[in-house]
Amino acid sequence: GGITTHKPRVYKPPQSIPAADVNTKKKFAFLQTETIPDYRPVDPLDIEKREKTSNNQSTKIHQLQQRFGHVTIQ
């Protein structure tokens, strides 16, 4: 290596803001905005599709619970 001296160095704070600070500021800026309700009409086919999906998922979950219900997770 090279020759080093014990000359004191002036501390220079980092010029750029860390990403975490930027994300935190964005989060709180978002949380401070008022929620705007969405009153657009919903398509009846979309409602039916959502109901079928949730019914299908709940039956699958029920089947899995029946199949693996006796297993205890520790």
Image (cartoon, grey):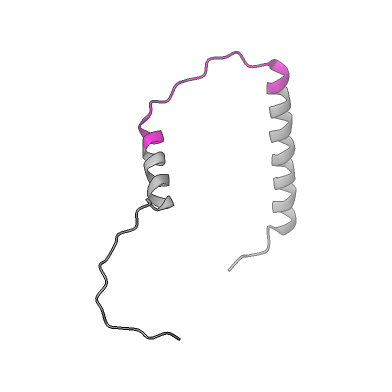
Residue 40 to residue 54: above or below? above
Q: Is residue 74 left or right of residue 29?
A: right
Q: Residue furthest front?
A: 3
Query: Residue 38: x and y, percent?
Result: 52, 19
Locate the C terminus and report the quarter of the image it occupies. bottom right
Query: Residue 10: x and y, percent?
Result: 25, 67
Image quadrant assignment for residue 43? top right
Q: Name the foreground residue: 36 vs 49.
A: 36
Number of numbered discs overlaid on the protein picture: 0
Q: Name the foreground residue: 66 vs 19.
A: 19
**Magenta residues (range):** 29-46
Image quadrant assignment for residue 41? top right
Locate the N terminus and report the quarter of the image it occupies. bottom left
Query: Residue 28: x and y, percent?
Result: 36, 39
What residue is rendered at 38% in x and 52% in y?
16
Please name the predominant secondary structure of the magenta segment in the image: loop
Is residue 44 a member of the stretch shown in magenta?
Answer: yes
Q: Is residue 22 left or right of residue 57?
A: left
Image quadrant assignment for residue 3? bottom left
Q: Is residue 22 left or right of residue 44?
A: left
Query: Residue 67: x and y, percent?
Result: 75, 56
What residue is rendered at 35% in x and 53% in y?
15
Q: Is residue 74 left or right of residue 10?
A: right
What residue is rendered at 63% in x and 65% in y?
72
Q: Name the foreground residue: 64 vs 4.
A: 4
Q: Name the foreground residue: 6 vs 46.
A: 6
Q: Residue furthest top?
A: 41
